[in-house]
Every structure is written in C-alpha cells, then in structure tokens.
Image (cartoon, coloured by chain):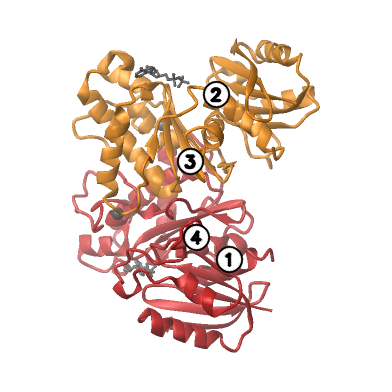
Chain colours: A red, B orange
Amino acid sequence: MYYGAIEAGGTKFVCAVGNKDGEIIDKTKISTQSPEETINNVINFFKNYPLKGLGIGCFGPVQIDKSQGNYGEILSTPKRKWRNFNIYKKFKNYYDIPVYLDTDVNVAALGEYRWGAAKENNSCLYVTVGTGIGAGFVKDGQTLNGVNHPEMGHIRVKRSKEDDFQGVCPYHSDCLEGLASGPAIEKRYGVKASELSHRDDVWELESYYLAQAVMNYTLILSPHKIILGGGVMKQSHVISKIKGKLEKMVNGYVKIPPEFIVKPKLNDEQGIRGALALALQEKGE
Amino acid sequence: MYYGAIEAGGTKFVCAVGNKDGEIIDKTKISTQSPEETINNVINFFKNYPLKGLGIGCFGPVQIDKSQGNYGEILSTPKRKWRNFNIYKKFKNYYDIPVYLDTDVNVAALGEYRWGAAKENNSCLYVTVGTGIGAGFVKDGQTLNGVNHPEMGHIRVKRSKEDDFQGVCPYHSDCLEGLASGPAIEKRYGVKASELSHRDDVWELESYYLAQAVMNYTLILSPHKIILGGGVMKQSHVISKIKGKLEKMVNGYVKIPPEFIVKPKLNDEQGIRGALALALQEKGE
Ligand SMILES: Nc1ncnc2c1ncn2[C@@H]1O[C@H](COP(=O)(O)OP(=O)(O)O)[C@@H](O)[C@H]1O
Ligand SMILES: Nc1ncnc2c1ncn2[C@@H]1O[C@H](COP(=O)(O)OP(=O)(O)O)[C@@H](O)[C@H]1O
Ligand SMILES: [Zn+2]
Ligand SMILES: [Zn+2]
C-alpha cells in the first residue's frame, strides 16, 4: 500500500512514497522549474508506485477553500509561472486517486502533531522562521484554514525602542516577518544570520519579537504546544530566551504548560512526513 | 421538547428555556449572588420544564478541557465566592441530562453563527468590547478551546504615538484590553465612554487599537466574518473606521471579504441563544 507525499516549495519539490505507518520508502528532491517541467519530474518519480492517495503541502498563497471554484490554485505568488496554476487539479486529473492539499506550514504542523514533538498533544502550532515567517495550526488532527489560509507571520508586533530598522516586508514593512525573518536579520546587521550566533544583542531582539508573536498565538489559539522550526531557529539557544520573555509578558494570566515551546523533532522532515500524514489521515488510516 | 440555556455572568445569570428551533419560550434574569443562592434560583426557574439538555456559557476563567479532572471549575476569578466552584458538576449532578459548557464568548459566537450575523458563514469570530475584551471563535459549528480557553482580549498592540495612557489591565497594563476596553476609555478621558460619541479623536484611537486586533485575529484564524459586540461597540460608527484602518494595514496581503466586520444581529441575545445552540448542537439537533 503506497501513499504519495509532496512538499511543494518555491525552490524545490520534495517527493516521497510512504506506507500507512508513515515510513518513507523512497524520496527525491526536484528543483522547482516551470510547472510543466516540475510536475513531469514528480510524476516520473512516482511512476513505479501504485499510489492509493496523495498528500500535498504547498507554498502559498494557495486556494484551500473547497467551496471555491478555483480550489487548488496557486494565487499571487512572486513566481510568475506558477501564478494561477492549479496544483490540485493537475494531480487529481492525472491520478485517479484521492488528492489532498494543504499549505506547507499546516502540513509541517501535521507531521509534528502525528509523529513529532506534539505526538502526545491535542493541538500544536508549528512556526517556521526562515526566509519568511509562517505558522500552521492543528487541533484534533485537523488543520486550520478559513476564508484565506492563515498568514501568521504578518501580524503586528511592538518595536523595541532601540530598533530603528525599517523592516523587509514588502506589504507591511515592520510586521513580524519584516522584523524577524532571516532576511530581516541579514539586512539589519549586514551579515548572514548564521554568522551572528555569538552576538547576544541580535538574539535578544529576535526573541523579543518572536515572544510577542508566541504570546499572541497563545492567547488566540491556545495551542498545547508551540514548535519553532525553520533556518533561523537553528539558533536553538533562542528558544529559552523566548520562553523567558513569554512568561514575563503573559505574567501568569494564562497557564503556560511545561515544555510549551520546543524544537521540531522530525529533522527537517516535518513537511514531507506531514504531507504523508495528510494522505493517510483523510483516508482514516 | 425543552432545552435549558444559561448565560452565566459576573453580575447576572440569564436563563432561558428554548425549543429545538432555537426559539426562546421562557426567560429570566437572576442577579449573581453566592453560587448556592444563584444556582438555587436558576433551578427554581427551570423546575416547570422537563429539560432534555442544558447549555451553559460561563464567565471565565473556567476549566473547559475535558481531559482535566477539574473540568467545569471556575478558576482564578476576582469573584472569590465563585473561585473553584464547579458549575458543570453542580448542574450535571442535579439534572440527569446532558450538560454542555463553554465560555461566554464562545457561546455568543455560536449564537451568531447559528442564527445571527454569520448564519451563512463557515466560521466567525465574535468579539466583545465592554468591561473587558474577549472573543470566541467558531468553525464548522465547533468552538475553539485549547490548553486554556483563548484570551484574545489580552494580545499586544502597538501604541499610538500620541497615546501615553498607561492602560488598565492589571496583568499587562497596555494590552488590547488595557488600552481599548470601556474602563480604559473612561479612565483615559475621565468620562464614561457612552458620553464621548461626539469626540472623533476618541474613536480614531479606539479604532486604531481594534483594527490591529482584528488584523491579528484575521491573519491567525482567517475567520469568514468578524462580529463586534459589547457595550463600547454601541458606538457603531466605529466599525467603518476599523474597516478602513484594517484594509490599509493588511494592504492587500490577504483577501478581506465584503461585509467582513459587522454588528451582531441577535440584539444582546447572542449569549443566551448561543447557550441554547450549544445544548442543541451537541445532541445533533
Ligand atoms: N544556522 C542558522 N542561524 C541563523 N539563521 C539561519 C541559519 N541557517 C539558515 N538561516 C537563515 O534561515 C533562512 C532560510 O530559512 P529556511 O527555513 O532554511 O528556508 P525557507 O524559509 O526559505 O524555506 C535564511 O534567511 C538564513 O539566513
Ligand atoms: N453607548 C455606549 N458607548 C460607549 N461605551 C458604552 C456604551 N454603553 C456601554 N458602554 C461601555 O461598555 C462597557 C460595558 O460593556 P458591556 O458589554 O455592556 O458589559 P460587560 O462587558 O460587563 O458584559 C462599559 O465600560 C461602558 O462604559
Ligand atoms: Zn508583512
Ligand atoms: Zn491584559
């Protein structure tokens, strides 16, 4: 019994074949070209496996509202060739099997929820702090989408008084992503974020912004666990700074469980395994 | 077929008997005394009706996590007599019928979702701006609770540069509730909020804070509709200010549907009718 999983990203597509226990049997990376070339390569990879279902975690924005005629369409992405490409329909028309679609961050949350850091929890939020900032929420096995999919990386945060960096978000300048994403750090200090490990001031500021975001997510969603992933969070010492600041800010108003903010457990496989979970769970397996 | 509904508030308990169409057949208000006196009065009101189920929307904080031993217990409320009182158990032990409990704001959201402003929507957020600020979220008929219940009124917002009011929240000073609740307005200007209708600057500032909150709620939850209720929102002209500011802040990044931010439709009955909806829906009716 084979299930297909795709983590569709702007730079690469990770594709995997898994079984119903969530084990990955085969896996490949395909660099993202035009939709046509890319999908051909994906189909070529899957061709030796009779798939029973396919789960896709896709970069956004993507239409995930099933009541809409354009369900599955990639929307206003800067990747022009992909704009208005319907990734769901493409696979649905090609394979005569159930195809399930969700956002990349929701699917990552699902992976950690089913097999990773939130395996024992009823809900979790997976936050990625990388080139952009995004988050996916799962509760009782269901991801959260609405009239749009959430765009949690673009919430407003208070600036630190010492920070006069204008921010890098083309839409909002100094939203969370504008102030705290990898590119924001790089632009503020003129050095790649990965080369700033020793600079305590950098991570004090970073954790101030992320703690505010975590506070708002906590008060709005009340997740059982918050998992911080993505390139910037390779600086895993930042987690304890965030925790400390969160507790100060929340000030006892709501209960912060032990082990509330953690690293991912699936070693950069949360996306692809989450896509597999999506294929599995929707079939009730 | 009778169903009982209780909107349990800090100053009054609204109790109603309804039928399966959500029509209210009988209703009363009971002032909130000690738990014992209050509950006796409630039971007395219901005594002529053979109830099939009971829905309760309760003031918080209240334990709504069913996996916890103290499910149904009122937690660290300033109303000392009610602290550690288990409202769920009290009714569950008295009546041999299904009893359903949720927070006051979730239940209000459920009322508007089922019969009010969000009747046609798949999800909605109900925000009350009154003595406190709180919000309840419903998606596909289910309210959102987690490790705690959400406390959306306490999120952080950016201050307006002109505003040096310290805020009234005893936990966070200048969280949203601290800056934009009814008591915050009253303390900032030294006059009751209801007497400030003519002061455009007051509502410019108020809408600035509420628009930020609405923006964060929108990016995190992606609701189909946001309903603004509570005493302060009797200033219904504020809604169009909030809309305008929200659109500017979101700046086209996510789609804001038409009629996204609206007034409640149930005329201050969203709480009690929502409690009725809770009793009904959980029985699949
Ligand atoms: N060890 C590191 N420490 C801090 N930042 C890092 C580290 N490694 C990568 N980054 C930053 O993370 C970002 C890339 O995030 P990543 O999650 O890997 O990719 P993406 O978000 O594009 O999927 C870049 O801005 C990079 O500078
Ligand atoms: N017409 C009005 N305009 C502005 N504020 C009002 C108005 N009516 C009541 N308020 C304010 O709303 C708050 C009470 O909110 P309400 O929702 O009625 O009660 P509660 O939040 O206690 O359940 C008070 O702070 C009051 O000043
Ligand atoms: Zn932004
Ligand atoms: Zn507060």
Q: Residues within 10 Å of mark 1 (few under 14, many from 20)?
A: many
Front residue of this view, candidates A161 and B65:
B65
The numbered mark at residue A106 is: 4
Q: Residues within 10 Å of mark 2 (few under 14, many from 20)?
A: some
Front residue of this view, candidates A8 and A71:
A71
Q: Amino acid at mark 4?
A: Asn
Please identify the quadrant where the C terminus of chain B is shown.
top right
At a point 52% along the width and 20% down the height, the residue shown is B78
- Residue annotated with mark 3: B124
Q: Residues within 10 Å of mark 3 (few under 14, many from 20)?
A: many
> Dot 3: what SS?
strand
Q: Position of residue B142 (x, y in %)?
A: 59, 43
> Dot 1: what SS?
helix
Q: Amino acid at mark 3?
A: Cys
- Residue annotated with mark 2: B77
Q: Report if the beta carbon of the residue with label 3 is closer than 8 angstroms to ligand 2.
A: no
- Residue annotated with mark 1: A278
